[in-house]
């Protein structure tokens, strides 16, 4: 009996050491090979296109891989160029709006300072200042300190912005080099995709291959389900926002609804990134009725998302609503806004591993020594 316990402890320590080595490799090796991991993912993404061109069009595989990579690069460049162009246009419109807003607040401030109450307060302060010369040094010192603090913070902000811009410019050659490495590695991986898969499969035992295949199959289904869930939530948000804007008789309601639906892709912020500034702007610039209507619409969207999102994720990804909600909350507490994605993804991975009987196999190995 003692020998059985000793063997179980030994096998348990062996499994623990393997898990620790895998964790250490994930932490320390991943930064060294991450371009090739990206290349592998890229080769996996374009592999269906490559297979179609190779099997249907009967062109050489290297040409099929090159064509797929060029198509992918062209699509990404088009999307990035469109985004940059849109951002520049929005910055121009924003600068014009800021000029109008600055002029408005300047007028409001001048009217505020010219009011009789403020002028009376200024006169009283001048009288106090003249009648109490002992306080002049203290007041001047405080004003000087406040001015210096404002100047230092402004200088720090400008330096931070300029340093960030310089770092982006300096890092462009590194990004270009990384992009070339990723594309070249993706070409070589995609060209010999089946050979690489056979080699990796040959390194692993049959039981491990079965478990990995089951886990990977579940993860693929979960990934498609997660994308479907996000598409459903975005569609619901777009429809609700568009209907609400039409009821409020907002101009360009359909276009604004589509744009807000796209903004809903942002983690945690979502619709609030567009609607909260809009509502605040309307309250400040004197259209409280529309601001109240948009506030009610925003509240309806928030409530609908909180009710529907766990259920949609559960039905699309294959998780129960309560564990999904717990995973989202735990991810938010541990990793911030990105934890809302990391939590459910981690739960999906653990569920896939569980359905592949990996935990059961580990337990059987520790307890009985069989695989």
Image (spheres, rainbow, N blue to C red):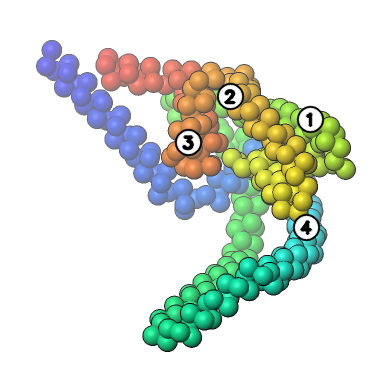
Q: Position of residue 100 (x, y in %)?
A: 78, 64
Q: CA distance from mark 1 to mark 3?
A: 29 Å
Question: Which residue is rendered at x = 54% and y = 81% of the image?
Answer: 126
Which quadrant of the rendered structure holds the C terminus?
Answer: top left
Task: Mark yes or no: residue 224 visible.
Answer: no
- Residue at image coords 56%, 27%: 219
Q: Which residue is mark 1?
A: 239
> What separation in Å lies between label 4 and label 3 (alpha carbons)?
33 Å
- Neighbours of disc 3 within 10 Å: few (<14), some (14-19), many (20+): many
Separation of marks 2 and 4 at Cα, in angstroms = 34 Å
Q: Is residue 107 above or below residue 241?
A: below
Query: Dot 2: few (<14), some (14–19), or many (≥20) neighbours within 10 Å?
Result: many
Using the image, determine if residue 84 lies above or below residue 268.
below
Q: Give the CA separation, mark 3 to mark 2.
A: 14 Å
Q: Nearer the viewer, mark 2 or mark 1?
A: 1
User: In what element is the residue under mark 3?
Assistant: helix
Q: Which quadrant would residue 296 be assigned to in this image?
A: top right
> Within 10 angstroms of label 4, few (less than 14), some, or many (20 or more) residues?
few
Residue 194 vs residue 258, the one in the foreground? 258
Name the residue beneath numbered marker 2: 310
Q: Which residue is mark 4?
A: 90
- Sequence order check: which comes first, mark 1 or mark 4? 4
């Amino acid at each position: 009996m003692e020998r059985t316990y000793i063997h179980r402890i030994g096998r348990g320590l062996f499994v623990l050491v393997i898990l620790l080595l895998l964790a250490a490799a994930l932490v320390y090796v991943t930064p060294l090979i991450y371009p090739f991991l990206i290349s592998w993912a890229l080769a996996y993404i374009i592999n269906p296109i490559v297979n179609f061109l190779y099997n249907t069009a009967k062109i050489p595989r290297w040409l099929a891989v090159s064509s797929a990579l060029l198509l992918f690069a062209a699509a990404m460049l088009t999307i990035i160029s469109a985004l940059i162009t849109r951002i520049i246009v929005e910055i121009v419109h924003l600068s014009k709006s800021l000029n109008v807003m600055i002029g408005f607040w300047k007028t409001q401030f001048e009217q505020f300072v010219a009011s009789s109450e403020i002028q009376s307060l200024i006169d009283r302060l001048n009288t106090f200042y003249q009648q109490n010369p002992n306080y002049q040094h203290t007041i001047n010192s405080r004003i000087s300190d406040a001015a210096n603090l404002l100047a230092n913070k402004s200088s720090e902000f400008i330096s931070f912005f300029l340093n960030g811009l310089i770092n982006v410019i300096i890092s462009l050659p590194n990004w270009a080099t990384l992009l070339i490495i990723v594309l070249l590695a993706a070409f070589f991986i995609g060209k010999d995709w089946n050979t690489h898969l056979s080699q990796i499969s040959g390194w692993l035992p049959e039981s491990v291959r079965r478990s990995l295949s089951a886990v990977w199959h579940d993860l693929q289904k979960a990934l498609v389900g997660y994308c479907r869930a996000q598409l459903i939530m975005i569609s619901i948000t777009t429809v609700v926002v568009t209907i609400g804007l039409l009821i409020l008789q907002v101009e360009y309601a359909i276009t604004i609804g589509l744009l807000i639906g796209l903004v809903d892709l942002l983690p945690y912020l979502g619709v609030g990134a567009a609607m909260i500034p809009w509502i605040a702007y309307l309250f400040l610039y004197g259209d409280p009725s529309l601001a109240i209507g948009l506030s009610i619409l925003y509240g309806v969207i928030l409530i609908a998302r909180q009710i529907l999102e766990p259920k949609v994720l559960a039905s699309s990804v294959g998780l129960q609503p309560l564990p999904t909600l717990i995973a989202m909350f735990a991810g938010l507490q541990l990793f911030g806004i990105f934890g809302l994605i990391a939590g459910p993804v981690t739960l999906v991975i653990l569920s896939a591993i569980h359905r592949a009987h990996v935990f059961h196999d580990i337990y059987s190995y520790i307890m009985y020594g069989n695989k």
